[in-house]
Image (tube, rainbow, N blue to C red):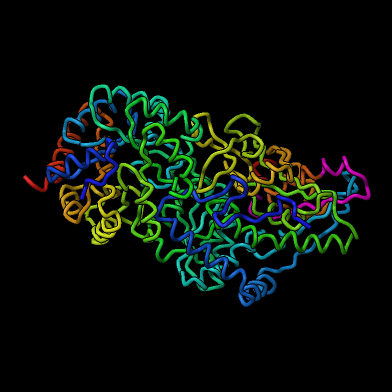
């Protein structure tokens, strides 16, 4: 049996079709090769796999439950909505799946200084946790604007022993934090490991981060088959850089009957600069070392983005998403800030689960999708993080 | 040794001509439209009159990962002055009617993709540009690009850095035209006070591999005359100076008319240092 074309891994040069690649300064070419080789070696090493599985089980809290949100399901009146509870992981988000994997890899490579970028702060926190647990030094780049809106996470990173570098260039958000982390890496290649937080950047990051996150989908597929006896009609996940969505999609890629829906941040509206939806509203381009869909103006300058959720506030997207969209395997939609707030309140009030604003976009879309399906169908939403970090923002939106 | 350069290449001709006189090539970088079109033109003119052998013009990009704060700020100024690839190409076109030197462009890959590769290189060629430096387009990703550029008589100038492996260096030397742009340090663009021994070592390594088939110019962190003479004595055929010039532009934003005088003085000193003989 031949596999469908979309079920491929990145090529040796890190291309998913024409997307991906390594569009980076020359100084990073050698370290990326060393990293790709090391990752390939360790990913095939049973003792590395065992070590990682141990950390994911004993430290991060895997497996996470697949929870039937029955009150939300009755409220919506359609397909049964299941939540993959990544919000229950240590640190409160799926990010720890990746940071443990990469921090172990870094330690095995003999690198003791770890740098990372962060948007909402979830990846920064997860990096700080993994580094503290493994005895590594963490330095986190975070945009000045994100520091303002995610103060709690900044404080958590500091408590965990990480150093937080504010980034005041450009739009002072995630994209600029990545620029600054890349500049740090170019300067300190010899002793530094760059622990990227999503399925973005140059090869091997999109492949490596996807592999570390694909545990989400592997568990979810087993769980839904056990709990429902059949595959779901659809998987819904939010897409910023795209790691939680790739993580849950991957195990279902060959199950053609399962619809895969990525939900991008519709922000305020769909005019330029007012959203963060590169797959829906962007064009092909090159940013942060990868060929992918990018929000940009006609001259190729990257657009500023806007979203109520700092974690989705990014003008590009992982190259594998661009590829999956181009072959028609996945669909991408948007939900606005106000849709996300609806999803946020609905889940809090009906299920007693406060979601992060990022997966609140997925919740909101899932309720609409569920309505169009039959009662015997099911949908899985990747609940990629919990909402404690967003309580300040919500309090400002609903001040009573 | 220099007979084996690509003979019809105007950039390599410049290196040969100066090399035969015992001189290194001094390449001056300015961000196009920084801080405004008129000042840019005056500044570029003063650099050429002050002795710059080649001029490299930056086209700004919103996310310049290879650049330090000085050139990042120049990019922001240029964009707020309305810079677009189209307008900067036109500005170079005007300069090239006045000065018969090959111009270079340094920019990132995305603005070129947005304009369309063929359209960009064709227009660049028509405006006197003979070489392109694209820091985020490494050799492996640049195959198709290189061919299109060459068709329009534009050199793809590849970068080499202190950690580039010997195998890659052989390939880079083989595929580059014009010169190999040697990044002489680990880091981003920006003036440094001292030239590290590592920079000189890297020059020697790359020169050995280049074996006279293509000139080698060193850039990043080069700000003073003694940096230029040290690099040339170590074997480099040229030196690229950028941030120190851009910083001069930035220091005279209140009175941009002052900048040309200072730029001319700086470039003269650097050019003087490139004359190893005579």
Q: Position of residue B10 (x, y in %)?
A: 27, 35
Q: Is residue A259 visible?
A: yes
In the image, B250 versus B234, the foreground residue is B234
What's drawn in magenta, residue-wise?
Answer: A367-391
Q: Give the left or right position of residue A79, taking residue A353 as reference.
A: right
Q: Is residue A399 visible?
A: no
The correct choice, above or below, for A85 with respect to A288 in the image is below
Q: Quadrant of residue A168?
A: top left
Which residue is depicted at the point 38% across and 51% down?
B172
In the image, B165 versus A339, the foreground residue is B165
Q: Is residue A379 magenta?
A: yes
Q: Quadrant of residue A42?
A: bottom right
The correct choice, above or below, for A223 with respect to A73 in the image is below
Q: Position of residue B220 (x, y in %)?
A: 30, 49
Q: Give the left or right position of residue B154, taking residue A208 as reference.
A: left
- Looking at the image, the residue that sits furthest to the left is B278
Q: Position of residue B243 (x, y in %)?
A: 28, 43
Q: Quadrant of residue B202?
A: bottom left
How many numbered tags mark residues here? 0
Q: Position of residue A76 (x, y in %)?
A: 87, 44
Which residue is depicted at the point 63% across and 59% down?
A95
């Amino acid at each position: 049996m031949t596999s469908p074309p979309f079920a491929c891994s990145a090529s040796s040069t890190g291309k998913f079709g024409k997307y991906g690649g390594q569009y980076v300064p020359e100084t990073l070419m050698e370290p990326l090769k060393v990293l790709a080789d090391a990752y390939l070696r360790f990913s095939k090493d049973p003792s590395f796999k065992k070590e990682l599985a141990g950390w994911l089980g004993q430290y991060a809290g895997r497996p996470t439950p697949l929870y039937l949100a029955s009150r939300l399901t009755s409220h919506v009146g359609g397909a049964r909505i299941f939540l993959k509870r990544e919000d229950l992981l240590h640190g409160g988000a799926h990010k720890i799946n990746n940071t443990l994997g990469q921090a172990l890899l870094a330690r095995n490579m003999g690198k003791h200084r770890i740098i990372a970028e962060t948007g909402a702060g979830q990846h920064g926190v997860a990096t700080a946790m993994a580094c503290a647990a493994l005895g590594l030094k963490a330095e986190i780049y975070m945009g000045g604007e994100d520091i303002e809106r995610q103060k709690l996470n900044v404080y958590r990173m500091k408590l965990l022993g990480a150093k937080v570098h504010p980034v005041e260039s450009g739009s002072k958000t995630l994209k600029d934090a990545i620029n600054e982390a890349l500049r740090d890496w170019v300067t300190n290649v010899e002793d530094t490991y760059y622990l990227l937080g999503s399925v973005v950047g140059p090869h091997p990051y999109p492949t490596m981060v996807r592999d570390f996150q694909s545990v989400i989908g592997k568990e979810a597929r087993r769980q839904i088959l056990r709990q429902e006896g059949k595959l779901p009609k659809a998987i819904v996940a939010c897409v910023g850089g795209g790691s939680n969505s790739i993580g849950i999609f991957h195990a279902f890629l060959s199950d053609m009957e399962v619809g895969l829906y990525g939900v991008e941040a519709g922000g305020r509206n769909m005019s330029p600069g007012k959203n963060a939806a590169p797959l829906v509203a962007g064009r092909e381009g090159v940013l942060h070392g990868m060929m992918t869909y990018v929000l940009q103006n006609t001259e190729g300058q990257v657009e500023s983005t806007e979203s109520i959720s700092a974690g989705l506030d990014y003008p590009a997207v992982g190259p594998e998403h661009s590829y999956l969209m181009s072959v028609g395997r996945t669909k991408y939609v948007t939900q606005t800030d106000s849709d996300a707030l609806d999803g946020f309140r609905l889940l809090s009030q009906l299920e007693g689960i406060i979601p992060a604003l990022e997966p609140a976009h997925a919740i909101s879309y899932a309720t609409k999708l569920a309505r169009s399906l039959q009662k015997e169908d099911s949908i899985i939403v990747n609940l990629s993080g919990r909402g404690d970090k967003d309580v300040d923002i919500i309090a400002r939106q609903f001040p009573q | 040794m220099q007979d084996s350069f690509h003979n019809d290449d105007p950039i390599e001709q410049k290196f040969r001509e100066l090399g035969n006189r015992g001189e290194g090539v001094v390449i001056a970088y300015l961000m196009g439209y920084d801080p405004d079109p008129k000042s840019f033109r005056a500044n570029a003119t003063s650099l050429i009159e002050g002795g710059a052998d080649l001029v490299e013009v930056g086209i700004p990009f919103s996310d310049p990962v290879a650049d330090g704060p000085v050139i990042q700020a120049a990019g922001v100024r240029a964009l707020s002055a309305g810079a677009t690839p189209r307008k900067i190409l036109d500005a170079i076109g005007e300069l090239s009617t006045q000065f018969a030197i090959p111009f270079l462009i340094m920019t990132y890959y995305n603005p070129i993709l947005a304009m369309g590769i063929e359209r960009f290189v064709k227009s660049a060629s028509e405006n006197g540009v003979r070489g392109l430096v694209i820091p985020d387009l490494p050799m492996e990703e640049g195959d198709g690009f290189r061919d299109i550029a060459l068709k329009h008589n534009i050199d793809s100038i590849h970068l080499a850095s202190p950690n580039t492996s010997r195998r890659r260096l052989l390939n880079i030397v083989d595929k580059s035209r014009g010169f190999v742009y040697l990044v002489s340090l680990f880091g981003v663009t920006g003036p440094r006070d001292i030239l590290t021994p590592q920079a000189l070592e890297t020059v020697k390594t790359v020169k050995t591999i280049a074996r006279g088939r293509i000139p080698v110019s060193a850039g990043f962190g080069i700000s003073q005359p003694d940096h230029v003479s040290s690099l040339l004595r170590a074997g480099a055929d040229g030196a690229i100076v950028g941030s120190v010039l851009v910083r001069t532009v930035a220091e005279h934003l209140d009175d941009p008319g002052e900048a040309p005088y200072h730029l001319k003085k700086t470039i003269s000193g650097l050019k003087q240092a490139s004359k190893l003989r005579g």
